[in-house]
Image: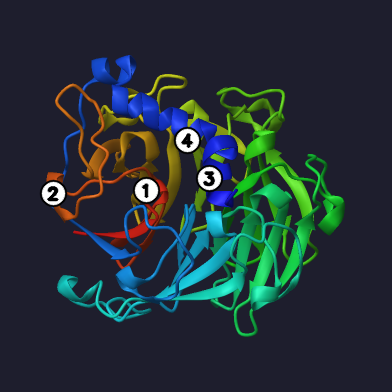
């Protein structure tokens, strides 16, 4: 059986459950009302084709992906994809957006080309090596060094954090071991369980890890590869309590973003339907937006807003963008005011998500299930995970 089908039938039952509830119109979401778009946007498919899976490199819609669950903009304007179903890391080069250059909106999706960086199609296992000789098992979240030379990968089913020297495509392991555990330590002595999200400190010295299976937030000192736990009470202590360090609890955190000053870590606390924040000087965790255990679509001030399975976050100045997976839309938290709004995707008047594949302006652009997003020069790139496509949101 192909791995993509296995993922849908086993490893991603939770995803399918979310789709089912979204398509049926979950009662809570229905009661809480609809999101309203805050501004006009243009949603465009830039790579891949809806539900046509594969690992084909090449121009834009001639390329193919399988269940991509990670996406990251690099300093040079390249877009890296964790092509999860294919167990590969891919790269998109675009002639429309490049590092340090702002270009007209209509050029953003011109000359898009996809190439493979590391890993091999459906060869799910663990192996360090160069390019296609390396092996991953469900790679998801990524982070990149400030100089753009090293890509870090949360290799979720291998329970490891890997790194890729982008000049040579050499893959190596910096922390974790194949069996799941939660102990702190140095390098391979440390343990993770299904790490899914990564974020890099602005100075490039610290890598933050959303250790999803352990319901914890960890950090790696990149000078020593020493792993320590910052917050969360562990696998058996899922919850939504605010607090300091291990007094705080999470439920499957999946994505992280660091403020530009390096002082605040934002967390997509996925199964709690919350956006959290942590002050890194004190490891103090608080809830920024959402209601724990109550999915919905409502916009407004943080405590009044509702999310439904937020899977990914990306920061751009005072804007925190959220891939709100089961709502099939993209939300934004204004970090100055705490107000939540919808920037792309649509819901029916009762709050029922509209899941689709259509490109278009404003409410005409739809997503299947946005699983990951990144921002580059104010343009959003979204991995529409079960659709097997990469989408662009231009403002």
**Circle 2 residues within 10 Å: few <14, some 14–19, many ≥20:** many
Q: Sequence order check: which comes first, mark 1 or mark 3?
A: 3
Residue placed under numbered mark 4 in the picture: 15
**Circle 3 residues within 10 Å: few <14, some 14–19, many ≥20:** few
User: What residue appears at the point 52 percent right and 46 percent down from the top-left corner?
Assistant: 255
Viewer-proximal residue among 318 and 226: 226
Nearer to us: label 3 or label 4? 3
User: What residue appears at the point 70 percent right and 70 percent down from the top-left corner?
Assistant: 134
Residue placed under numbered mark 2 in the picture: 362
Residue placed under numbered mark 1 in the picture: 320
Q: Sequence order check: which comes first, mark 2 or mark 3?
A: 3
| 82 versus 58 height, above or below | above
The dot on residue 5 is 3
Q: Residue furthest front?
A: 1
Q: Determine the CA span between mark 1 and mark 4.
A: 23 Å
Dot 1: element: strand
Q: Which residue lies furthest to the bottom in this view?
A: 167
| 23 versus 162 height, above or below | above
Q: Residue furthest right?
A: 189
Dot 3: element: helix
């Amino acid at each position: 059986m192909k791995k993509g089908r296995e993922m849908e039938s086993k490893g991603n039952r939770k995803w399918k459950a979310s789709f089912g509830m979204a398509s049926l119109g979950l009662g809570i979401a229905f009661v809480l009302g609809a999101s309203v778009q805050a501004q006009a946007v243009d949603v465009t498919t830039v790579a891949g084709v809806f539900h046509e899976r594969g690992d084909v490199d090449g121009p834009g819609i001639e390329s193919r992906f399988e269940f991509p669950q990670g996406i990251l903009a690099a300093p040079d304007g390249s877009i890296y994809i964790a092509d999860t179903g294919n167990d590969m890391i891919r790269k998109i080069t675009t002639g429309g957006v490049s590092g340090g250059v702002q270009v007209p909106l209509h050029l953003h999706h011109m000359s898009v080309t996809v190439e493979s960086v590391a890993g091999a199609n459906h060869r799910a296992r663990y192996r360090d090596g160069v390019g296609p000789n390396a092996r991953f098992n469900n790679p998801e979240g990524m982070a990149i060094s400030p100089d753009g030379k090293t890509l870090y990968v949360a290799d979720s089913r291998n329970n490891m954090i890997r790194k890729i020297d982008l000049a040579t495509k050499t893959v190596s392991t910096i922390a974790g071991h194949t069996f799941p555990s939660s102990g702190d330590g140095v390098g391979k002595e440390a343990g993770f369980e299904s790490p899914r999200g990564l974020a890099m400190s602005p100075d490039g010295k610290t890598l933050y890890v959303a250790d999803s299976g352990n319901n914890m937030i960890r950090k790696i000192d990149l000078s020593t590869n020493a792993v320590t736990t910052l917050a969360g009470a562990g696998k058996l202590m899922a919850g939504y309590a605010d607090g300091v360090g291990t007094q705080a609890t999470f439920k499957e955190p999946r994505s992280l973003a660091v403020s530009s000053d390096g002082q605040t870590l934002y967390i997509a606390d996925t199964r709690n339907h919350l956006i959290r924040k942590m002050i890194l000087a004190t490891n103090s965790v608080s809830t920024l937006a959402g209601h724990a255990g109550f999915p919905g679509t409502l916009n407004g001030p943080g405590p009044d807003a509702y999310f439904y399975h937020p899977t990914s976050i990306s920061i751009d100045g005072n804007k925190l963008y959220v891939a709100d997976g089961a709502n099939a839309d993209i939300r934004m938290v204004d970090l100055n005011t705490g107000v939540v709004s919808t920037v792309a995707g649509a819901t029916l008047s009762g709050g029922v998500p509209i899941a689709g594949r259509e490109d278009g302006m404003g409410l005409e652009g739809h997503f299947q299930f946005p699983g990951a997003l990144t921002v580059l020069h104010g343009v959003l790139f979204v991995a529409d995970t079960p659709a097997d496509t990469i989408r662009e949101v231009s403002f």
